[in-house]
């Protein structure tokens, strides 16, 4: 058995190390704090992918508390930054918009290689274990390998995968999947889409068509549109989120590959920039390493703090 918080700590180890070095380097050998000191810290946070808005806000909070005499050590700085990050991450934190009747339809979008299909498989594992009836729609009809990957997850978790031949109209597959989910009283239908660059106009317009098709079959759907973001991209992920939000109506994020990068601060940058909630974070390769996002756990793990929040146990 392992606690959920321990999954966050392990998954964010590289980011924690990077953040600790950032704070330590900004104030090493500094006997008196001045404007240059604060500017150095701000620049360091930005370089750690916290984003400009969040970095300015955190440094402002540190300056104010220092002037009040509340800061004496670098540990105090870390504590304040941790509190501020948790506050930022909580601003848009909300529950998933599950449908009150009929299937909840979640459209998952993202660029090539962002971990989209793997995240869908892990979500299926999570919800199936929670007792939900799940169905998958393989709407990436451009790559046969993508359909096969989704079918493998379907076989592994025991769920139905609706698919078609290579080159089929993705909207037609979505239509069939939604119709099937309704007739079979499915709880959650997760729709996989083709990985695409946010600069590819034609493929981005296709997402709009899929949304319209899904809405015709199930009015008000999709209930969520989640963008998978490769966390190793750091601040570059902000541009992706901007373009996908314009076209696909992104309602939330799944941050992937956090265990392999030191750029965990980008979750804060995206929150401040777009007011988009993070729903899940990928903290390792195992199915249970995709965890529902917890702002307190994330902030504490990012700054290497111990959690006093009550934790549930998850299976190793």
Image (cartoon, rainbow, N blue to C red):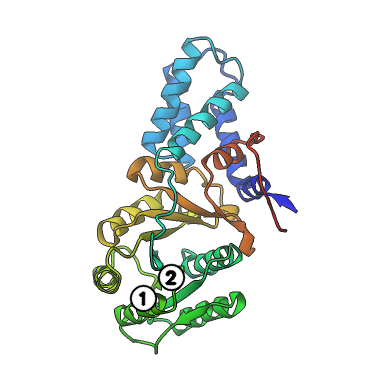
**Viewer-proximal residue among 143 and 162:** 162
Which residue is under mark 1?
Answer: 178
Query: Residue placed at 58% from the left, 41% from the top?
Result: 297
Give how far across and how far down residue 99 sits, in percent. Answer: 38, 60
Q: Position of residue 53 (x, y in %)?
A: 36, 35
Q: Residue at x 38, y 73 (%)?
A: 194
On the question of residue 73 being in view, the answer is yes
Q: Earlier in the sequence, mark 1 or mark 2?
A: 1
Up-down: is 46 above or below 124? Answer: above
Q: Secondary structure at mark 1?
A: helix
99 and 127: which one is in front?
99
Quarter of the picture containing the N terminus is bottom right
Residue furthest to the right: 1
Q: Position of residue 9 (x, y in %)?
A: 65, 45
- How far from the left and from the top, in percent, is residue 96? 43, 54
Q: Which residue is at 34% across, 77% downward?
A: 174
175 to 282, vertically: above or below: below
In the visual, does 281 lie left or right of 99?
right
Q: Is residue 150 left or right of residue 213?
A: right
The residue located at (29%, 62%) in the rendering is 248
Q: Is the C-beta separation of discs 1 and 2 under 8 Å?
A: yes
- Residue 10 located left or right of residue 207: right
The reply to whether residue 44 is visible in this rendering is no
Helix, strand or loop at disc 2? strand
Mark 2 nearby-residue class (10 Å; few <14, some 14–19, many ≥20): many
Residue assigned mark 2? 189
Residue extending farthest to the bottom is: 165
For marks 1 and 2, give the CA distance. Answer: 7 Å
């Amino acid at each position: 058995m392992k606690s959920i918080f321990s999954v966050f700590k392990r998954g964010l180890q590289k980011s924690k190390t990077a953040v600790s070095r950032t704070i330590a380097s900004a104030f090493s050998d500094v006997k008196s704090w001045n404007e240059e000191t604060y500017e150095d810290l701000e620049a360091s946070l930005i370089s750690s992918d916290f984003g400009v808005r969040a970095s300015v806000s955190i440094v402002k909070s540190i300056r104010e508390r220092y002037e009040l005499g509340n800061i004496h050590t670098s540990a105090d700085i870390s504590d304040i930054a941790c509190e501020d990050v948790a506050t930022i991450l909580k601003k848009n934190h909300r529950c998933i918009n599950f449908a009150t009747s009929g299937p909840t339809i979640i459209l998952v979008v993202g660029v090539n290689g962002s971990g989209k299909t793997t995240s869908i498989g892990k979500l299926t594992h999570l919800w199936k274990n929670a007792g939900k009836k799940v169905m998958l729609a393989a709407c990436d009809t451009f790559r046969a390998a993508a359909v096969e990957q989704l079918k493998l997850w379907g076989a592994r978790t025991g769920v139905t995968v609706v698919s078609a031949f290579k080159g089929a109209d993705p909207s037609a597959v979505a239509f069939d999947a939604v119709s099937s989910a309704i007739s079979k009283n499915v709880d959650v239908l997760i729709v996989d889409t083709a990985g695409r660059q946010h600069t590819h106009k034609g493929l981005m317009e296709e997402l709009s068509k899929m949304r319209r098709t899904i809405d015709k079959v199930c009015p008000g759907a999709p209930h969520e549109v989640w963008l998978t973001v490769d966390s190793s991209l750091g601040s570059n992920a902000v541009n992706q989120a901007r373009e996908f939000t314009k076209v696909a109506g992104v309602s939330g994020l799944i941050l992937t590959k956090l265990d392999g990068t030191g750029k965990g601060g980008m979750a804060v940058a995206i929150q401040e920039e777009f007011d988009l909630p993070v729903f899940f974070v990928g903290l390792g390769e195992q199915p249970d390493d995709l965890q529902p996002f917890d702002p307190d756990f994330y902030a504490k793990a990012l700054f290497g703090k111990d959690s006093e929040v009550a934790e549930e146990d998850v299976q190793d």
